[in-house]
Image (tube, rainbow, N blue to C red):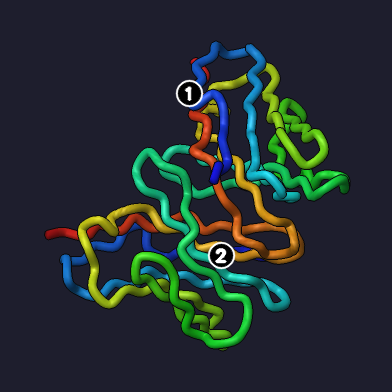
């Protein structure tokens, strides 16, 4: 069965510190991988995606993600967190005409 | 430019009533998706339209749920005989539909079934 897992319901980090939000996937073939962010009372916004090529993908708002094929992971990272990064983050992959979303990780950045 | 719009933004209904939710995708986007997001949970795929092909209805939870799309424009998601467990935010997204293209989401319709 194809699935995407976000093992942490919540991640807490202090402003200015690096952050990582984890994502692993189980799928046949070579999926396209995405990260989306959902701010309170707003729709999901696209952050970044990996299709092929360089394993390190850079996206919006200073975020980046590293594709690791051997570990089937696509962790989201940012070198220095901002309080305004506090939101709900979703990992997703696209395969055979469908998108599969993780359950989401709530990121709390404290001043 | 205009993004994906959904209406109504909020809907309160009584158990057993039918509701209709509307999605206006971005112009030129051939693919359209509906998702359900229950409180504190992730996105649950419901249905997918791609151009004039038959829709992928594999995510619809029961036969009370149906959706239509006219060509490559507006889509409506209908829930018949609503139940309290249908209470959720219903999200619509569209994409160019070329395969793995970025989805653009609407703000959602928050449905509350009393």
Q: Residue B3, image x and y in percent?
A: 55, 43
Q: Which quarter of the rendered picture does the C terminus of chain A lie within?
A: bottom left
Total marks shown come to 2
- Asked whether the viewer can see residue A1, the reply is no
Residue shown at the point (48%, 78%) measured from the top left = A57
Badge 1 is on which residue?
B10
Q: Contact (CB < 8 A) between labels 1 and 2?
A: no
Using the image as rendered, state which of residue A42 and residue B83 is in the foreground: A42
Image height of A68 relative to A19, above or below: below
Residue shown at the point (21%, 66%) measured from the top left = A13
Q: Which quarter of the rendered picture does the N terminus of chain A lie within?
A: bottom right
Image side of residue B55 versus residue B28, left or right: right
Residue shown at the point (59%, 46%) measured from the top left = B44
Q: Residues within 10 Å of mark 2 (few under 14, many from 20)?
A: many
Q: At numbered mark 1, what does the secondary structure look like: helix, strand or loop?
A: strand
Image side of residue A17 versus residue B47, left or right: left
Spatial separation of the CA atoms under disc 1 and disc 2: 30 Å
**Which residue extends farthest front?**
B1
Q: Residue A46, image x and y in percent?
A: 49, 58
Image side of residue A87 versus residue B40, left or right: left
Q: Residue B76, image x and y in percent?
A: 70, 29
Q: Which mark is residue A72?
A: none
Chain label for disc 2: A
- Asked whether the viewer can see residue B67, the reply is yes
Badge 2 is on which residue?
A4
Q: Residue A56, image x and y in percent?
A: 47, 83
Using the image as rendered, state which of residue B92 and residue A107 is in the foreground: B92
Image height of A91 relative to A42, above or below: below
Q: Residues within 10 Å of mark 1 (few under 14, many from 20)?
A: few
Chain label for disc 1: B
Image height of A18 relative to B95, above or below: below
């Amino acid at each position: 069965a194809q699935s995407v897992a976000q093992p942490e319901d919540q991640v807490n980090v202090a402003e200015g510190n690096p952050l990582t939000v984890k994502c692993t996937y189980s799928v046949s073939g070579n999926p396209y991988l995405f990260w989306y962010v959902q701010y309170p009372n707003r729709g999901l916004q696209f952050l970044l995606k990996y299709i092929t090529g360089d394993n390190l993908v850079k996206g919006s708002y200073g975020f980046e993600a590293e594709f690791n094929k051997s570990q089937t992971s696509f962790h989201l990272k940012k070198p220095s967190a901002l309080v305004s990064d506090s939101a709900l983050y979703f990992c997703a992959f696209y395969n055979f005409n469908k998108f599969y979303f993780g359950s989401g990780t709530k990121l709390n950045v404290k001043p | 430019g205009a993004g994906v719009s959904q209406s109504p933004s909020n809907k309160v209904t009584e158990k057993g009533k039918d509701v209709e939710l509307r999605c206006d995708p971005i112009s030129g986007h051939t693919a359209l998706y509906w998702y359900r997001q229950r409180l504190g949970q992730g996105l649950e795929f419901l249905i997918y339209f791609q151009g004039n092909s038959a829709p992928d209805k594999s995510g619809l939870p029961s036969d009370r749920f149906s959706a239509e799309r006219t060509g490559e424009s507006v889509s409506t998601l209908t829930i018949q005989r609503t139940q309290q467990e249908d209470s959720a935010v219903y999200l619509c997204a569209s994409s160019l539909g070329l395969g793995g293209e970025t989805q653009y989401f609407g703000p959602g319709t928050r449905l509350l079934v009393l």
